C-alpha cells in the first residue's frame, strides 16, 4: 500500500528543559490586573502597580522607610513577649515561625523618628504578621507609644492595618481596645496631635478603638475599612450592601474619614498637618 511506502518523519528526542530564565523572587503578580511586575519597579513606584494603580500592602519596615527620614528612626525596646493565655498548642510555634519568615517580632513596630526634620512618635502595624491582629503585645506597644508621646510632648501617628483582635488571646486581646482608648484620652487632655492613617485592611477591634479616634483620620486609596466584613453584615441584616461599601472612598463620602491621600504624598501631607498644629 502507498501508506507503507511513505517514510515517517523522524522526530528528535527533545526533552523539555526544567530550567527557568526568570530569577526566583524577582517578580510579583498584581492581585487586581494579574500582570507580572518586576519587584524593583514596584518598589520604586511606592509598592503601587504601575499598570492599574493597585496599592500593594507594605511591611512595617518598608512603611517606615517611606515616611521617616533616613537614619532617624529609633525603635522602642520594651523587652516583652506574647503570652498564650488559652494554652493553644500551635500558637507559640506559629509566632516563632512568623518571626523567622517575616523578620519582625510582632504585628506593630513603634518608635521615634523625624518627618522632614520634625520629631514624631510613630506606630506602624504590619499585616504580614498574623494579619496585624491586636494581641497583648500590640496593645502594650501602642499604649507605651502614646504615653511616650505625652511625656515628650510629641505628635503621634499610627498606621493601622489589621484584621482585628487576636482570637488566640481571647479576652486579653479585647482588653487592648479599652487600654489604648484610655491612653488616647490622656493624649487628648494633654492637647497633643494624633493622626490615624488607615491602610488596607483595617478591621475589627482596631477600627473600634484607636484607628477611628484620630484628631485627623487619613486613608490610602482603595483601603478596606470597617468593623465586621461585608459578607457577615449582609448575612446579619439580610440585605445587599451598596457598591463600594467599606472602601476608603465610601467612608470619605459619608464623613467617617477626613482625607484620602496617595502614598507618594503621605509624608509631606503628614508634615504639613503637624506644622499646622
Image: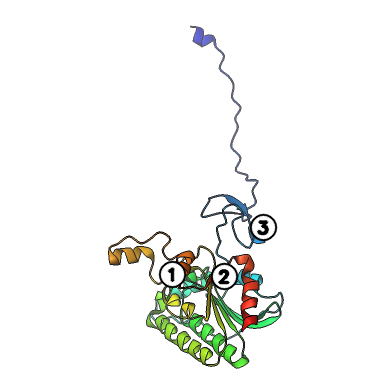
Label 1: state its secondary structure.
loop
Residue bearing mark 1: 254
The mark found on residue 40 in the picture is 3
Mark closer to the chain start, 2 or 3: 3
Q: Where residue 70 sits in the image (x, y, percent)?
A: 71, 74
User: Is residue 106 visible to us here?
Assistant: no
Label 2: state its secondary structure.
helix
Left or right position of 45 against 227: right
Residue bearing mark 2: 100
Q: Residue at x 45, y 76 (%)?
A: 206
Q: Residue at x 48, y 81 (%)?
A: 213
Please determine whether, in this image, residue 188 is positioned above or below residue 8. Answer: below
CA separation, marks 1 and 2? 41 Å
Q: Residue at x 61, y 54 (%)?
A: 50
- Front residue (pair 8, 230): 230
Q: Where residue 248 sits in the image (x, y, percent)?
A: 48, 66
Mark closer to the chain start, 1 or 3: 3
Left or right position of 208 against 64: left
Please determine whether, in this image, residue 81 is positioned above or below residue 43. Answer: below
Query: Mark 2, residues whose alpha carbon is within 10 Å: few (<14), some, or many (≥20)?
Result: few
Q: How is the image coloured?
A: rainbow
Query: Mark 1, residues whose alpha carbon is within 10 Å: few (<14), some, or many (≥20)?
Result: few
User: Is residue 249 visible to us here?
Assistant: yes
Mark closer to the chain start, 1 or 2: 2
Amino acid at each position: 500500500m502507498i501508506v507503507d511506502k511513505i517514510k515517517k518523519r523522524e522526530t528528535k528526542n527533545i526533552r523539555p528543559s526544567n530550567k527557568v530564565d526568570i530569577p526566583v523572587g524577582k517578580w510579583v503578580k498584581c492581585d487586581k490586573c494579574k500582570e507580572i511586575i518586576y519587584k524593583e519597579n514596584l518598589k520604586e513606584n511606592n509598592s503601587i502597580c504601575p499598570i492599574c494603580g493597585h496599592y500593594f500592602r507594605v511591611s512595617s519596615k518598608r512603611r517606615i522607610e517611606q515616611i521617616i527620614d533616613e537614619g532617624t528612626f529609633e525603635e522602642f525596646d520594651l523587652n516583652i513577649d506574647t503570652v498564650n493565655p488559652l494554652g493553644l498548642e500551635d500558637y507559640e510555634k506559629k509566632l516563632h515561625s512568623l518571626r523567622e519568615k517575616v523578620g519582625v517580632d510582632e504585628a506593630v513596630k513603634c518608635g521615634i523618628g523625624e518627618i522632614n526634620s520634625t520629631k514624631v512618635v510613630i506606630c506602624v502595624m504590619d499585616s504580614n504578621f498574623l494579619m496585624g491582629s491586636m494581641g497583648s503585645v500590640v496593645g502594650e506597644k501602642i499604649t507605651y507609644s502614646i504615653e511616650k508621646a505625652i511625656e515628650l510632648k510629641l505628635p503621634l501617628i499610627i498606621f493601622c492595618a489589621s484584621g482585628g483582635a487576636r482570637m488566640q488571646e481571647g479576652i486579653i486581646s479585647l482588653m487592648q481596645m479599652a487600654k489604648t482608648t484610655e491612653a488616647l484620652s490622656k493624649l487628648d487632655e494633654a492637647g497633643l496631635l494624633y493622626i490615624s492613617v488607615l491602610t488596607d485592611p483595617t478591621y475589627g477591634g482596631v477600627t473600634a478603638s484607636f484607628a477611628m479616634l484620630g484628631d485627623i483620620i487619613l486613608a490610602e486609596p482603595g483601603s478596606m475599612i470597617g468593623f465586621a466584613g461585608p459578607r457577615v453584615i449582609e448575612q446579619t441584616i439580610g440585605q445587599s450592601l451598596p457598591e463600594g461599601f467599606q472602601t476608603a472612598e465610601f467612608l470619605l463620602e459619608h464623613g467617617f474619614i477626613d482625607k484620602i491621600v496617595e502614598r507618594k504624598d503621605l509624608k509631606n501631607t503628614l508634615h504639613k498637618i503637624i506644622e499646622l498644629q
